[in-house]
Image: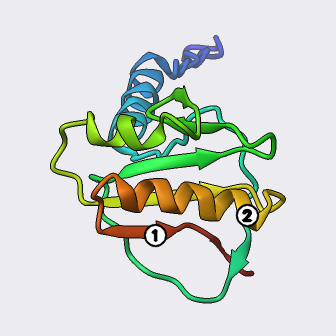
């Protein structure tokens, strides 16, 4: 008889996390590329709240009015006196103007902008609000 004690071989398990990291990065890349982010330009406007909600097409002219009564269209500052000519010269088939005015802007200035928009020949004007929570 063999009196020697047999030593069992220790089995070492190596868990390779390389493929796991590859899969995680591929999932991250997939969700990052397929996510749709709606971004507004860097114009700070605090919209008034409203309970009514409506759908708006994405192909529209968007006018931003800041609290300092600055008007932005396509990221360009447009003066109140030049707004009508700017909208006429934009040669786009867009028929609707979305007005995103800060809630602190005086109503008189908003009405002046609305008059200039109507004089430019655009038939539809929408005032944007944010949904009341």
CB under 8 Å between discs 2 and 1: no
Secondary structure of residue under mark 1 = strand
* Residue on which disc 2 sits: 108
Depth check: give the residue in front, 113 or 47.
Answer: 113
Q: Residue at x 70, y 56 (%)?
A: 109
Q: Position of residue 10 (x, y in %)?
A: 58, 17
- Image location (x, y in percent) of residue 86: 38, 35
The residue tagged 1 is: 126
Name the residue: 58% across, 40% down: 80
Res 128 → quadrant: bottom right
Decide which of 107, 42 is in the foreground and name it.
Answer: 107
Q: Earlier in the sequence, mark 2 or mark 1?
A: 2
Image position, residue 121 (x, y; %): 27, 58
Helix, strand or loop status at disc 2 = helix
Specify whether 53 is left or right of 65: left
Q: Give the CA distance from mark 2 to mark 1.
A: 17 Å
């Amino acid at each position: 008889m063999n009196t020697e004690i047999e030593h069992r071989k220790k089995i070492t398990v190596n868990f390779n996390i390389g493929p796991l990291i590859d899969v995680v990065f591929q999932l991250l890349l997939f969700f990052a590329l397929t996510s749709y982010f709606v971004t507004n330009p860097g114009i700070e406007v605090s919209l008034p709240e409203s309970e009514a909600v409506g759908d708006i097409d994405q192909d529209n002219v968007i006018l931003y009015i800041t609290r300092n009564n600055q008007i932005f269209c396509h990221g360009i500052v447009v003066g109140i006196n030049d707004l009508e000519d700017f909208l006429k010269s934009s040669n786009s088939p867009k028929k609707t103007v979305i007005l995103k005015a800060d809630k602190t802007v005086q109503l008189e200035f908003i009405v002046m902008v609305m008059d200039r928009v109507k004089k430019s020949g655009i038939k539809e004007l929408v005032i944007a609000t944010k949904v009341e929570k």
